[in-house]
Amino acid sequence: FFWGNVALKKIYHSKKYMLRLKDITYKSGWIWHSVTSVPYNRIQHVEIEQGPIEKIYGLSTLEVYTAGKSTSDLSIPGLDSETAEKLKDFVLGQVMTKQEEE
């Protein structure tokens, strides 16, 4: 039981996202690290997913898509629904801004 709690805390604290000037980045991994960045000017679609278990706990997953793939290029799980909605709005705003600059 003790080691399970320690592992869950480590996993929770190993997930981070960054909203930078030109891209959105997601870092995850406690033992094996993964960093995914998607430039705003490459984003085609952003959506919020919520499975049945996530719905029970009020959580959502932000999915970011670029052209040419049927799966998301960046996925940020475990966000509360309000934060996911705000992130989606921010990212879409950045996408619109980058499209206007081009």
Image (spheres, rainbow, N blue to C red):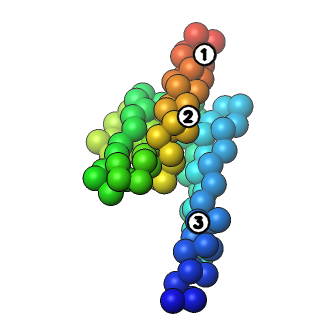
Instruction: Find residue 85 and report its horizontal and vertical position in percent.
Output: 49, 32
Q: Residue at x 33, y 57 (%)?
A: 53
Q: For the residue marked with disc 3, what is the amino acid?
A: Tyr
Distance from disc 1 to disc 3, alpha carbons, whole Å, reads 32 Å
Q: CA distance from mark 2 to mark 3?
A: 19 Å
Give the left or right position of residue 72, taking residue 89 as reference: left
Cα distance in 3D space between marks 1 and 2:
15 Å
Nearest to N terminus: mark 1 or mark 3: 3
Name, please, the residue furthest toward the top: 100
User: Callout 1: few (<14), some (14-19), or many (20+) C-alpha neighbours within 10 Å?
Assistant: few
- The reply, left or right, for residue 41 in relation to residue 58 is right
Residue tagged by mark 1? 97
Please report the residue visible at 42 percent of the width from the left and 28 percent of the height from the top. Answer: 44
Residue underneath mark 3: 12
Label 3 secondary element: helix
User: To which residue does mark 2 refer?
Assistant: 87
